[in-house]
Image (cartoon, helix red, strand yellow):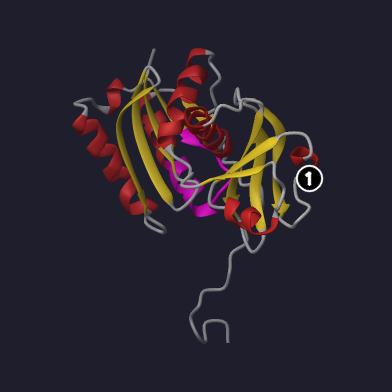
Amino acid sequence: MALILNIETATPVLSVALAKDGEVIALREENTQNRHSERITLFIRELLEECQVSHEDLDAVAISEGPGSYTGLRIGTSTVKGICYAQDIPLIAISTLKAMAWRMAIRWKKENNKKDVLFCPMIDARRMEVYSAFFDSANHQIRKVQADIIDENSYENFLAEKTVVFGGDGAGKCKEVIRSENAVFLDNIHPSSEAMAPIAETYFSNKNLADVAYFEPFYLKAFKAGKPKVKGLYD
């Protein structure tokens, strides 16, 4: 039973939720590409004021650990570490794809009767590449997170046996090329702190906590800085 601040910064969606006992009581969320650093502290302050609580009332902070944007993940990590250190409270790290899969499963159960399915949340990487993983209906991960190059043969071993539900901003790439009758696509699925809340509560209860000092986001790929688009800078 805990009051947990949940923060999602892995993609262009900035999402912050305050949850009590696993239930979201306040939420701020918007697509703010390249503005996470400007908006994150504002969102947190607004949520705490709306619910009439302070940082001192928090039992833990949960962060979406990736994979995703290098910059976004760094911003989220530095923010939650600052809160955890200042308040001496635990840090909870949740896979971005696991939270997406949980949201997909909840929506699927409301709209469909078929139960024996797999969920494949996807985050757009570049060109025809996505970050993905596979989860069953109970949100157990059955294939590790990895970067996949999408073509007409992608995931054929899974699709040959079960219905696979794809979702996320990377799923559109699959929709263009995968023709299997077992492939289903859910629209409007994105990483959200709202989906983190029930997972964070379970992790907190089970003492599945991250080490605040040593925690690092799961980038999946090494960061490569590009050249600034300023003419003559490298001439």
Task: Identify which residue is drawn at 75% across, 50% down.
Answer: 154
Q: Position of residue 167 (x, y in %)?
A: 56, 44
Q: Position of residue 169 (x, y in %)?
A: 53, 52
Is 154 placed above or below 7 here?
A: below
The residue lying toward the viewer, choosing from 95 and 170, is: 170
Q: Is residue 79 left or right of residue 227?
A: left
Q: Amino acid at mark 1?
A: Glu
Give the image quarter of residue 33: bottom left
Give the image quarter of residue 66: top right
Task: Identify which residue is drawn at 49% across, 29% down.
Answer: 106
- Say which element carries label 1: helix
The residue lying toward the viewer, choosing from 90 and 93, is: 93
Q: Position of residue 83 (x, y in %)?
A: 37, 33
Q: Is residue 65 left or right of residue 13?
A: right
Q: On the rendered image, what quadrant is the N terminus found in?
A: top left
In the rendered image, residue 25 lying in the magenta stretch gets the answer no
Q: On the rendered image, what quadrant is the C terminus found in?
A: bottom right
Q: Is residue 43 left or right of residue 135?
A: left
The residue lying toward the viewer, choosing from 207 and 112, is: 112
Residue hosting label 1 = 156
Specify the segment rendered in magenta: 63-78
Q: Position of residue 19 (x, y in %)?
A: 35, 25
Residue 154 can be seen in this image: yes
